């Protein structure tokens, strides 16, 4: 069976990574969370004193990019690959609201994008990959056979992310999560380098009123049809 490349882009907390993981498992493909890579670089900057309150030393970060090694290792218990920064598992640390509040600034830096896009393209060079992010169907894999663009209302997305953070035990306010979601949507959509836009050939899926199961069934069907079309 021919393997294809599946690119899933869209706004924050639209369910991209949930459906990408389910899809990869169902098809026997590799799942890559490109957002985790931008979060890992942000976490590095925070840990190394390059981000303090509102002060962000982007020049120092660009200089230190060569010291940042991001990798993924499959965790059989979880069923997906976790992200490592310089060989240390940072999967949990990168999901905080604090990392979320700086990540879009870090992701707007061209040097950061260049490094990560190169690594993402290497990871997907043999196809059989599901990658989610903001520029996967436009920049990373413009030739992907299946491109999806996920949307949902900001309030729905913030509520979903808020519940997730509360369940992890993080002390956050719903309004802070909503503000973060809206701020990231704005920065990600308006940056100069690789802004978040729907690729011309992407299929848009608004999942505001779809359950996880409904969303997965719809997308799995699309994937199977696309794979059959390439046999
Ligand atoms: O899970 P969530 O949608 O909240 O975010 P994410 O996928 O973990 O991505 C975090 C941030 O990384 C985004 O808000 C973007 O600023 C950046 N990002 C990007 O610029 N390009 C990508 N391909 C993936 C993420
Ligand atoms: O990767 P992205 O930021 O786009 O979203 P996610 O982490 O996959 O999903 C964010 C949260 O929304 C998760 O807790 C999902 O279970 C939830 N979700 C949902 O309840 N219903 C959907 N149709 C999609 C996502």
Image (cartoon, grey):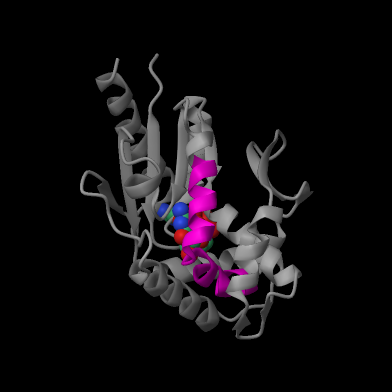
Magenta region includes residue 113: yes
Q: Residue at x 46, y 42 (%)?
A: 131
Along the line of sight, which residue is nearer the eye, 20 or 100? 100
Which quadrant of the structure image shows residue 203?
top left
Along the line of sight, which residue is nearer the eye, 137 or 48? 48
On screen, residue 51 above or below 9: below
Report the number of numbered marks.
0
Residue 72 image position (x, y, % from top left)? 66, 41
Which quadrant of the structure image shows residue 49?
bottom right
Is residue 91 shown to the viewer in this render? no
* Magenta span dominant secondary structure: helix
Q: Residue at x 32, y 48 (%)?
A: 138
Is residue 67 left or right of 211 when viewed as pictured?
right
Is residue 9 shown to the viewer in this render? yes
Along the line of sight, which residue is nearer the eye, 195 or 77? 195
Look at the image and tell me in which quarter the C terminus lies. top left
Look at the image and tell me in which quarter the N terminus lies. top left
On screen, residue 18 above or below 11: above
Q: Residue at x 60, y 72 (%)?
A: 59
Residue 62 image position (x, y, % from top left)? 60, 64
Magenta region includes residue 189: no
Residue 112 image position (x, y, % from top left)? 54, 59
Along the line of sight, which residue is nearer the eye, 28 or 155? 28
Q: Residue furthest left?
A: 200
Q: Residue furthest bottom?
A: 54
Q: Residue at x 50, y 44 (%)?
A: 118
Q: Which residues are magenta?
A: 95-120
Residue 156 image position (x, y, % from top left)? 41, 68
């Amino acid at each position: 069976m021919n393997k294809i490349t599946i690119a899933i882009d869209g706004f924050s907390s639209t369910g991209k990574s949930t459906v990408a993981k389910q899809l990869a498992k169902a098809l026997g493909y590799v799942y890559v969370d490109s957002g985790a890579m931008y979060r890992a670089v942000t976490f590095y900057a925070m840990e190394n004193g390059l981000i303090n309150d509102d002060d962000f030393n982007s020049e120092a970060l660009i200089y230190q990019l060569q010291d940042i090694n991001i990798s993924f290792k499959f965790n059989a218990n979880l069923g997906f690959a976790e992200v490592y920064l310089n060989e240390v598992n940072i999967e949990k640390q990168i999901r905080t609201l604090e990392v979320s509040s700086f990540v879009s600034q870090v992701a707007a830096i061209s040097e950061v994008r260049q490094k990560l896009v190169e690594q993402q393209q290497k990871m997907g060079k043999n196809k059989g990959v599901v990658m989610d992010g903001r520029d996967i169907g436009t920049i990373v894999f413009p030739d992907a056979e299946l491109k999806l663009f996920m949307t949902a209302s900001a309030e729905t997305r913030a509520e979903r992310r808020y519940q997730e953070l509360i369940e992890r035990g993080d002390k956050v306010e719903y309004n802070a999560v909503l503000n973060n979601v809206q701020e990231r949507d704005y920065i990600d959509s308006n940056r100069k380098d690789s802004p978040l836009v729907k690729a011309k050939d992407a299929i848009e899926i608004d999942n505001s009123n779809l359950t996880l199961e409904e969303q997965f069934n719809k997308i799995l069907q699309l994937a199977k049809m696309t794979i059959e079309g390439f046999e």
